[in-house]
């Protein structure tokens, strides 16, 4: 598992990289433990964290939400603990959920995956 977690690589940014690039929005964020890619969770419309796993094979993500430090393994579909990753360890505290605020549609609750 040591080659699946790089504790030195910083996160790719404060939000889902694909959503930021294509005008989308997200509910919660996940950070790849291998390369630092920040993607949106499976409740989000585009599910970019899972897509990143499918595209790269990087199996472990860590929550990128304030106060959360759990890891998720896409292979086993289980959560667990792991080492501290390079800072920052979460999205900015003042970032709303969902985000970015100016892109979230009024009917966002009907658009999330449950």
Image (cartoon, helix red, strand yellow):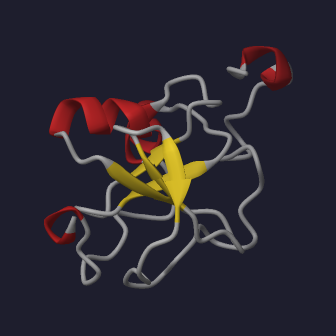
Query: Quarter holding the N terminus?
Result: bottom left
**Residue closer to the observer: 6 or 105:** 6
Residue 55 screen position, x and y as percent: 20, 31
Q: Residue at x 40, y 39 (%)?
A: 76
Residue 26 screen position, x and y as percent: 61, 38
Residue 92 screen position, x and y as percent: 64, 72
- Report the number of numbered marks: 0
Q: Residue furthest top?
A: 110
| Residue 94: quarter of image | bottom right
Q: Residue at x 52, y 41 (%)?
A: 40
Q: Residue at x 59, y 23 (%)?
A: 45
Left or right: 94 with respect to 10? right
- Image height of 4 relative to 112, above or below: below
- Image height of 90 relative to 37, above or below: below
| Residue 65: quarter of image | bottom right
Query: Quarter holding the C terminus?
Result: top right
**Residue closer to the observer: 66 or 82:** 82
| Residue 48: quarter of image | top left
């Amino acid at each position: 598992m040591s080659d699946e977690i790089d504790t030195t690589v910083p996160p790719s940014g404060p939000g889902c990289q694909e959503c930021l690039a294509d005008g989308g929005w997200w509910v919660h964020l996940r950070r790849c433990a291998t390369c630092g890619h920040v993607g949106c969770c499976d409740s989000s419309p585009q599910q970019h964290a899972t897509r990143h796993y499918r595209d790269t094979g990087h199996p472990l993500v860590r929550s990128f939400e304030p106060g959360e430090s759990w890891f998720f393994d896409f292979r086993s579909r289980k959560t667990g603990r792991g080492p501290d990753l390079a800072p920052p360890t979460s999205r900015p505290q003042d970032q709303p959920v969902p985000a970015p605020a100016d892109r979230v549609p009024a009917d966002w609750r009907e658009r999330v995956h449950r």
